Amino acid sequence: MNESNILIDTDSYKASHFLQYPPGLERLHAYLESRGGQYPYVRFFGLQYILQRYLSTPVTLEMVEEARELFAAHGEPFPYEGWKLIATELQGRIPLEIRAVPEGSVVPNHNVLMTVTNTDPRVPWVVSWFETQLLRVWYPSTVATQSYQIKCVLRAALEQSCEHPEAELPFKLHDFGSRGVSSRESAGIGGLAHLTNFQGSDTVEALRCGRNYYAAEMAAFSIPAAEHSTITAWGKEHEVDAYRHMITTFSQPGALVSVVADSYDLKHAITELFGSELRQQIIDSGATVVVRPDSGDPPAVVRMAVNALASRFGTTTNAKGYRVLRHVRVIQGDGVREDTIRQILDAVMNDGFSAENVTFGMGGALLQMINRDTQRFAYKTSAAIVNGQYRPVYKDPLTDPGKRSKDGVLDLVLENGRYRTVAGTEFGVSQPGSVLRTVFRDGELLVRDTLEQIRARG
């Protein structure tokens, strides 16, 4: 089957909905929101990718015929005449208008983030047909939101304990998540969502996504780093030789090199190998060696590592009264979540060390340990025109008042620095102070933000 056939990328029951709407239906208006969740806000990101990669694809008669055959065999009806009209008379252009908040915006929950309406009254059901694809913006938006929340935690710690927090912050949370996600596409768009907040990543697929969809020539940076196999392949009796080889190969003045150090005995590696046998080589190299623990209780292990390195390499005291390691740093990449980051920062700073001594690597918890309900994303229809008459559309289930949907032609406005969702009754009219932009109309992507622009909105 054609992998590019966007008609098939929907839910089965959508194929029968064209027969279920009331006679005389001309227009539908739908919206996307976070109905609340783990975080009090959403950092919106990823719609441009969805629109450029998928909804900008022209619908062809071949796609229509393939979809008709598939749904018939699947046991579903299919709006053949409507899709045929789109493929021929509308030249394959999907007749939707999509308005959305600028990507990178941080919007409190319970506000509209995107609206969708049809531009051709003959096919109003297309608004619902593309819910499946458009609602997937929950994923990059939730990654960006979690990453942004952690950025706020790190910023606060750095502002308290570091002389130059803005210089340190962009590289304090490194993406290790590529192997922990369910697909290459998730690695790309999820990894790029993280990079709306930071500039460090080992997820190479995010670099491709950044270049192809957000005009980012280089979205992130990394450094040479060891894994366990490149250390243990030397044998336990030659552990120090493995570390020495890393330092000799990659160290130069101003460079960073990361070495995993818990293959056998982390404390011994820090105090006796890095801190004794290799100490002078590290100092003379002019590089910063970043020691990586990868097992044990994260707060306790990082606290031990920082104190042990301080005893061997010494520290300076910055203008804010916190100690800064000389020649070495620590990166924690095991068991990293927002709560463990807070615990580690508390442990280190309570010992008098600056937060700049520790960097974090986050893998599956960053890109995979989330779902649509993390922020309770929903895509709902809120207004219709039937036989020329406006009609509010909403649900209000008695069994769960929290699932009551909004009604009206919705817009998002900014008043006195605060976002507010407002409802009207007229299609195609923007409210005064609206921050929603028309980003897509009739198969054409109208706004192309760069990653640089998106980062600036955070």
Image: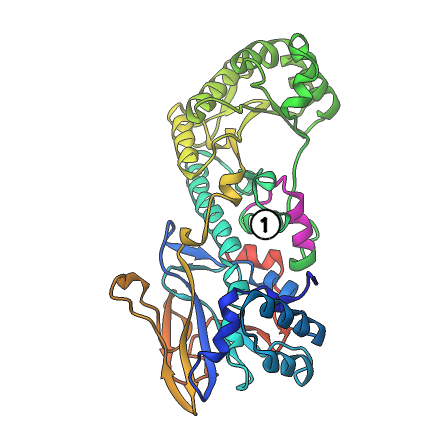
Q: Give me the residue at 60% from left, 9% from top.
A: 276
For the record, the magenta segment spans: 198-211
In the picture, the quarter occupied by the N terminus is bottom right
User: In the image shown, does 249 or 388 lie closer to the viewer?
Assistant: 388
User: What colour-coding does the image apply?
Assistant: rainbow
Furthest residue toward bottom: 388
In magenta stretch: residue 207: yes
Does residue 168 appear anywhere in the picture? no
User: In the image shown, does 380 or 261 lie closer to the viewer?
Assistant: 380
Does 150 appear above or below 124?
above
- Where, by quadrant of the figure, is residue 48 drawn? bottom right
Furthest residue toward right: 249
* Amino acid type, residue under disc 1 in the picture: Ser
Residue 173: % across, % down = 53, 39
Left or right of residue 323: residue 439: right
Q: Give me the residue at 39% from left, 36% from top.
A: 339
Residue 150: % across, % down = 45, 43
Question: What element does badge 1 sit on?
Answer: helix
- Where, by quadrant of the figure, is residue 201 drawn? top right
Q: Which residue position is annotated with label 1?
A: 186
Left or right of residue 78: residue 303: left
